[in-house]
Image (cartoon, rainbow, N blue to C red):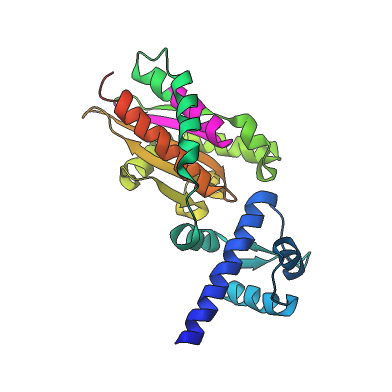
Amino acid sequence: MVRFLDRKKRQDQILDLIIQVYIEDGKPISSEGLKERFGLSSSSATLRNIMSELEQLGYLSHVHTSSGRIPTQEGFRYYINFLMKQPQVSSQEHVSALIDKGMGYIKEVDDLLEEASRLISNLTHYAGFSFLSDERSRLFFWGTHFMLQEPEFEDISVLRSIFNTLEEEMSAFRDFLENNLTKEVKVFIGDEIGLGQIRGCSLVLSSLEAEKNRRAFLGILGPIRMNYSLAISRLKILKDYLEEEFLGHL
């Protein structure tokens, strides 16, 4: 039993490091590269064995054109559920100051949600969006320039397909939001979204408190190789601010 737990802990540690590197660099990493980057005491052979175990578990994928591996969607899901650490709360004051600066002119819900999508995009450097569901659904989207900086979206046709999906499947997207979201921030990775080309992305989402006859949602759209810890924490800060200071008063 102890040996099993030791092996599990070792696998978790290596998967955590691999995902950290992949979020930063977006490139496959080898056992030698991992050992050198973190100054690990384990031999390259030992690290290769652990990475092979993680691949068998479905958490890593072998890139055949190199000696490296990358995390799978399942690997990211395991990371979010069990390994991810939240950033220090010390960043909250800085984030709150940026939010205060952008909210001075707000008088209508549409203005609020449009500004919220801009803010969450600037706070995370991913695409930000907000969605208001009532008699006429509205989607506010910001941050296309951030998406273009990600290697996953360098091909403009990929980005065009994502936008087309958002436009053409607006009703399905609204149903997805209304059926899956709660007040808590939730993450949907790749195939978990199930909406056309958006399946190649990840969504960090939350519903917002609004009036009874309409629902509001706030979210982040980015690559599956997203910095989830940063995205989740900053979405929570903005969500709490909007609910305390604005929603219900407009």
Q: Residue at x 71, y 60 (%)?
A: 28
Q: Which quarter of the rendering shows the N terminus?
A: bottom left
Name the residue nearer the viewer: 55 or 234: 234
Q: Which residues are magenta?
A: 114-134
Q: Is residue 85 left or right of residue 209?
A: right
Farthest front residue in view? 90
- Quadrant position of residue 214: top left
Is residue 128 highlighted in magenta? yes
- Quadrant position of residue 21: bottom right
In percent of width and height, residue 211 lies at 23, 27
Q: Is residue 226 above or below residue 5?
A: above
Q: Is residue 36 left or right of residue 22?
A: right
Name the residue nearer the viewer: 226 or 96: 96
Q: Is residue 242 above or below residue 221?
A: above
Q: Residue at x 40, y 31 (%)?
A: 131
Q: Is residue 129 visible?
A: yes
Q: Is residue 167 visible?
A: no
Is residue 131 highlighted in magenta? yes
Name the residue nearer the viewer: 153 or 88: 88
Q: Residue at x 55, y 45 (%)?
A: 197
Name the residue nearer the viewer: 33 or 193: 33
In percent of width and height, residue 107 lies at 35, 13
In percent of width and height, residue 83 lies at 49, 61
Q: Which quarter of the rendering shows the C terminus?
A: top left
Q: Is residue 172 above or below residue 16?
A: above
Q: Residue at x 34, y 47 (%)?
A: 180
In percent of width and height, residue 195 lies at 47, 46
